[in-house]
Image (tube, rainbow, N blue to C red):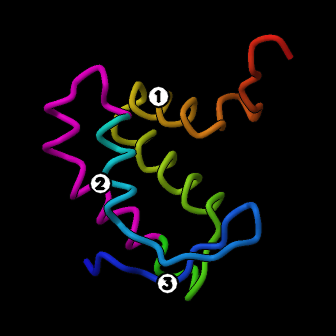
Amino acid sequence: MDAKLSVLHKKNGQTEPFYQGKIIHSIIRSFAHDEQFGINNALPLSDTIVSLLLPVGQSMTTAQIATTCHAVLQRFDATAAAHYAFAHNQFMGQKRRRKGI
């Protein structure tokens, strides 16, 4: 897969090139419960995610990427999917709250 894909539209309105490496890094972090397994499977999982994102077109949002990553991880490893969802504020559809707020 090409490491650079389309344009990413961030929540703050900015755009930047999309890099598959960011997905690989997120996948590895999601496998904190089995780091070596995550390292071994991060590239093929990210290839699957990118192939699912390609039909989206030349631009995508961070939400589209996060939703696709979570769906792929959910089918592969539920614990990793839960870690990913929590890290990306998708846990039960609510954002994490800061202490003291």
Badge 1 amino acid: His
Q: Residues within 10 Å of mark 3 (few under 14, many from 20)?
A: some
Please, is residue 83 above or below residue 69 in the view?
above
- In reply to whether residue 36 is colored magenta, the answer given is yes
Query: Which image quadrant: the C terminus?
Result: top right
- Element at badge 3? strand
For badge 2, the amino acid type reads: Leu
Considering every residue shown, the one lying at the far front of the view is 100
Dot label at residue 45:
2
Residue 7: name its quadrant: bottom right
**Residue farthest toward the right in the current orientation of the protein:** 101
Residue to which mark 1 is pinned: 83
Is residue 5 or residue 100 the one in the foreground?
Answer: 100
Q: From the image, give the main secondary structure of the stretch colored magenta.
A: helix
Question: Under tag 1, what secondary structure?
Answer: helix
- Give percent across and percent down for residue 97: 76, 22
Tell me the residue that label 3 is attached to: 6
Region rendered in magenta: 30-52
- Relative horizontal placement of residue 66, taking residue 24 as reference (left or right): right
Dot 1: few (<14), some (14–19), or many (≥20) neighbours within 10 Å? many
Q: CA distance from mark 1 to mark 3?
A: 26 Å
Residue that lies at the very extreme toward the top in this rendered image: 100
Determine the residue positioned at 30% across, 75% down: 3
Mark on residue 18?
Answer: none
Q: Does residue 59 appear left or right of residue 73 in this picture?
A: right
Q: CA distance from mark 3 to mark 2?
A: 19 Å
Q: What percent of the width, then of the height, locates residue 15?
A: 63, 76
Number of marks drawn: 3
Residue at 41% across, 25% down: 79
Which of the pair 34/52 is nearer the observer?
34
